[in-house]
Amino acid sequence: MSVPTFDATGLEPRSATDELRADAPLARTPDGTWVVLRHAEAVQVAEDAQTFSSAVSRFLQVPNGLDGAEHAAIRAATDPFFAPEEMARLAPVLRTIAVELVEELMDSVGPAGTEVDAVAALGAVFAVRGQTAWLGWPEELEPELLDWMVENHEASRSGDLARTTAVAERFDTIIRSVLAPRHAAGAPEDPTTALMRLEIPLPDPSVPGSTSRPLREEEIVSILRNWTGGDLGSIALCTGVLLMALSRAPELAARVRDGSEAEAGAIVDELLRIDDPFVSNRRVTTCPVTLAGQEIAAGERVMLHWTSINRDERVFEDPDAVAPEANAAQNLVYGTGPHVCPGRELATLELVTLLRELLAVADVHPAETPGEREIAPVGGWAHAPVVLVPRG
């Protein structure tokens, strides 16, 4: 079977892959990276971390860029930060933030409705406020983080490595500014301080006979970058995807508003499956392997294209049909295998909370202004205009 060429330059992720996926399970980029387009092959890759390594970046990425025992140990130590009891503690905090943000927004909404950008006006602001509240970061960081999100977005779209590296370094500087005062006595009791005190179940080379060690500062910075840098943009993009979809499906909006939180979460997951803004992850092969009938040598790059994978007609007969219950078991928006996203519960809590508080006081309608789709390597909507109309 011939392997088609995959070049997503200037294309949004769905249109770049929907037709391609029908002809082949794999494609290759001009630089030789294998691109996984279908569901079954994605599960094979994601669940075989020994053959398909996540150690693909020249930069430290903890824990998502680690493999084997080291990855498992750090995940075991850090996954409890997203445990149900932690989310239950955070839920009322996020609800207060959502209520206040919606009130601020609705103050400028006229009786007949007002157009807003769901990404910039809602998603980005809520993401920053929610993340800083969760981690105990100063509220004064909000303008800098919002500015960084814009800069990061533009750098990601540019594909310029020097530019994305500079943006990442700027974010690391922000993180270190939060860590510095916490080395002194009297540090606040919050997840950031708890992470700094964390012992991970790995021997410390400097301590003979040890069975655990503290995280190094560069590892702490990397974890916080992973938790926040990626999540800020993701929550903003997800908010755009969700409100654009709900503005055209009032019956779904009513279910999110009036149904249980579990039902709202299932609808959120399904809408993100249909239009997945978490576009891709990378792997590198550690040994020769056969994938979808193709012989792949050791050391070759593999891209999991989640936007395509979650629209595979072999699993989701009609990829655009909203069927939360039927599709839940196969939904890979947050990945699968040992590198499955640890922040799924947090992201779902944030998105459901924001949507329910907004829909309680406003109906969401399509705007006359056309939206602007993101282009690879980013997914979702760059600008997501919707009209908010006060309820009651």
Image: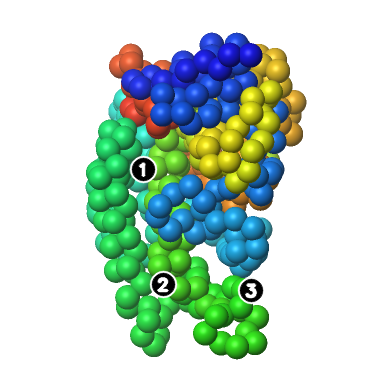
- The nearer-to-camera label among 1 and 2 is 2
Q: Secondary structure at mark 1?
A: helix
Work out how far the residue at label 3 is from the one at label 2, CA to CA, in angstroms. 17 Å
- Spot occupied by residue 355 in the image (x, y as percentages of width and height): 50, 37
Label 1 vs 3, first from the N-terminus: 1
- Spot occupied by residue 297 in the image (x, y as percentages of width and height): 59, 36
Q: Label 2 belongs to which residue?
A: 217
- Spot occupied by residue 89 in the image (x, y as percentages of width and height): 58, 63
From the viewer's perspective, tell me whether residue 277 is left or right of residue 268. left
Q: Are marks 1 and 2 in contact (CB under 8 Å)?
A: no
Q: Picture quarter containing residue 52?
A: top right
Whether residue 324 is visible: no
Q: Name the residue: 55% across, 80% down.
A: 205
Closest to the observer, 181 or 32: 32
Label 3 vs 2, first from the N-terminus: 3
Q: Picture quarter containing residue 136?
A: bottom left
Q: Label 1 belongs to which residue?
A: 124
Crowd class of label 2 (few under 14; some 14 to 19; many from 20; radius 10 Å): few
Q: Label 3 belongs to which residue?
A: 201
Whether residue 315 is visible: yes
Closest to the observer, 35 or 172: 35
Q: Name the residue: 50% across, 24% down.
A: 28
Label 1 vs 2, first from the N-terminus: 1
Amino acid found under the numbered disc labelled 2: Glu
Amino acid found under the numbered disc labelled 3: Pro
- Spot occupied by residue 276 in the image (x, y as percentages of width and height): 52, 30
Q: Picture quarter containing residue 18?
A: top right
Q: Secondary structure at mark 2?
A: helix
- The nearer-to-camera label among 1 and 3 is 3
Work out how far the residue at label 1 is from the one at label 3, CA to CA, in angstroms. 36 Å
Q: Name the residue: 29% across, 56% down.
A: 169
